[in-house]
Image (cartoon, helix red, strand yellow):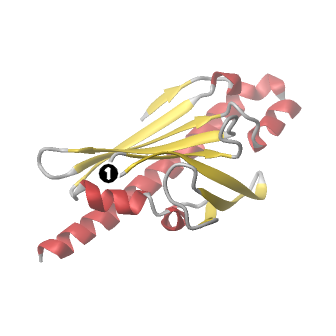
Amino acid sequence: MEWTGARYADTPTVEVRRTIAAPADRVWELISDVSLMPRFSAELQSAEWLDEKRGVGARFVGRSRHEAFGAWETTSCVVECARGRVFAWAVGDPEQPSAVWRFSITEKEDGGTELAQWARMGPGRSGLSYAIDRMPEKEQKIVYGRLREWERGMNAALDGLKALAEADAEGADA
């Protein structure tokens, strides 16, 4: 896990990684299926494509729930899409997103895959911005707490993706 930034204006980031004993093509199929992600998330309730387009510029809607923030819906836009390498999306306005999320894949020599998930807050406003507006003296604590939540969610997602990809790979070997 890696962390950067302490204030929202710093566009803080967090990243987690897993080594997966499955081919990069299979990992790609999983990470680029936005409808699969709620399966591994306590917060994201559903995600679905808004149109037939895939790749850069494609849009999807996500519906989330959090005990402190309530329920909300966001539209995201794919901003990077290179089959077998990277899948990234901006939440909200792609030019001024409230967050950017990215999966990166690296093929390993042993046939496995390294999968990284990275996320950046801001620079656009998000629900977290309103909490910071109400309690500016607690900004660093608010940002740190949310990054920790993101980290836990990312770890759960990567663990779930790893288990699914490896189970598929074992089934293919049988």
Work out whether residue 6 can be spotted: yes
Which residue: 41% across, 41% down?
Answer: 16
Which residue: 32% across, 58% down?
Answer: 27
Return the x and y of residue 93 as percentages of the image width and height: 71, 42
Where does label 1 land, which residue?
Answer: 84
Q: Secondary structure at mark 1?
A: loop
Q: Is residue 167 above or below residue 13?
A: below
Which residue: 65% across, 41% down?
Answer: 94
For residue 112, side relative to residue 42 (left or right): left
Work out whether residue 160 can be spotted: no
Which residue: 17% across, 73% down?
Answer: 172
Give the quarter of the figure containing the N terminus.
Answer: top left
| Closer-to-camera residue (86/125) | 86
Quadrant position of residue 31: bottom left
For residue 139, side relative to residue 3 (left or right): right
Q: Amino acid at mark 1?
A: Gly
Return the x and y of residue 22 as percentages of the image width and height: 22, 59
Return the x and y of residue 36 as percentages of the image width and height: 49, 67
Return the x and y of residue 114 as percentages of the image width and height: 28, 45
| Closer-to-camera residue (34/19) | 34
For residue 12, side relative to residue 168 (left or right): right
Quadrant position of residue 60: bottom right
Q: Is residue 121 above or below residue 69?
A: above
